[in-house]
Image (spheres, rainbow, N blue to C red):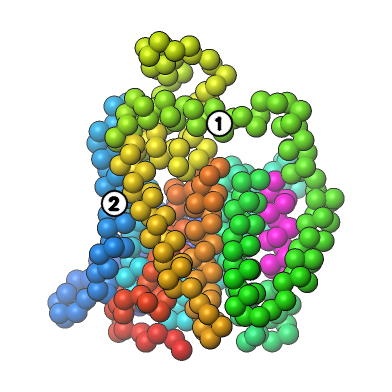
Amino acid sequence: MSRALLVVLALLVFVLPLVEAPKNLLWMLFVGLCAVAAVRAGLAGQPAFGRPERRHDLVFAGLFLASLISVVCAPVLQQWTELGNIVVYLSLGWVLSRVRLNERQIIALLSAAVAGTLVAVAIGGWIKVRTGRQYLELHSVGQVNHSALYGAAIGLLVLVATAACWPRLRRSGRIALALLSAAFFVLMFVWGSRGALLAYLAGLAMFGLYFLRTMKYRLVPALAGAAVLAALTLAANPLLIEKTASNFVEGSRGSLRLAAANTAVEIWRHAPLTGVGAAAFASVSPEQVRDWVTARGEAYVEDNYLFSNHAHSLFFNTLAERGLVGVAALLALLVVWSMALWQRRPDAGSSTLHWLIWGSGLAGWSMVFVGGLFNTTLHHEHGILGMLMFGLLLGSLPGSQPGSQPGSQPVAEPA
């Protein structure tokens, strides 16, 4: 990858949780540089983006086509803007899946993602303290549950980097990364999002168990330390406990996601093949759902349905907005991503870089699919971050196709 392209991509992932306008401008510059590199490589008779990997290319194409079909066939509202958002993160993942980056380039990209999140957390914390807000949010990511899911992926990435780089770090580096890992662990409780915490803990368990078993490290001290840190955090900031307790007292709050799922299923029954259109969930009114239910001769119970901007689940939201076509494309992504993690898993003799890329791919997988059980996770900032991690997993690990670097000569796989 050329230096200019790398700088643009690093800046893009840095500003991702911070501001909106520069993110869009940097993506357009990224696409422009990729186009120039492709033309130059074509004139030289060389591939610009490596050899095609049909299975992977079909996944990216399927996700785009499912979204396009849903917009074109939308019976309610055609959201062409959402299609542009989908193109942004799919293009990033597709390019990265076809090139092999060297160690410095990968570390630069992942470091930019972590650094941008730290700045966003600092700004969000300052705003929280200054205004007295209850929740901590990342400015560009927005609502606390979305911010927490983004933070879960970055927190897992930091944990992966700490474990993977530990043997080659000096004492000061070990202390710095250990403190950073602990800070993100604490933040997962401070955010107070149970879905994001579950995504974080699921990724932590999968990486930790596999890493510690493979590398022959002891698990008990790490678990004990995490338990103590979690207990201290909950004692100092009992937001998670208070939210859960209030849900039990109120009785109905815990059923909100079930009500949103009921709405999604009703929407899907109205447009089963292609859904009502990408980002069109909010355009369906309670009156429409009532008419659909009563037309079947069933009683419409208002409290059984929730109407919002989305279905609070990646899977139910996809079902409602993109129908069976969209669900098939999403399941294809889940299968290919899971297979890539399994087939390219490292062992005790693998390089630090191998562990780092594989672990970041796992972090993205956990954010998208585990977090996706409770929220929409494949859009905007989450989509870009997830596709960054997915693309690196496909393109820069042993077992990936030996691709050319856009704008540069091929880079040998690091030892």
Residue 97 seen in render:
yes
Q: Nearer the viewer, residue 79 or 213?
A: 213
Whether the magenta-drawn stretch holds residue 181 is answered as: yes
Which quadrant holds the N terminus?
bottom left
Give the magenta part as a residue range.
Answer: 179-192
Q: Which residue is mark 1?
A: 258
Instruction: State the residue position of label 2.
Output: 62
Eyeballing the image, is 311 above or below 157? above
| Residue under the image location 45 percent in, 77 percent down | 105
Residue type beneath disc 1:
Leu
Q: Is residue 215 magenta?
A: no
Location of residue 261 in the rendering, given as x and y in whole percent from the top left corner: 50, 32
**Camera-side residue: 275 or 236?**
275
**Foreground pick, 80 / 162:** 162
Q: Name above or below for residue 405 compared with residue 228.
A: below
Q: Earlier in the sequence, mark 1 or mark 2?
A: 2
Q: Nearer the viewer, mark 1 or mark 2?
A: 1
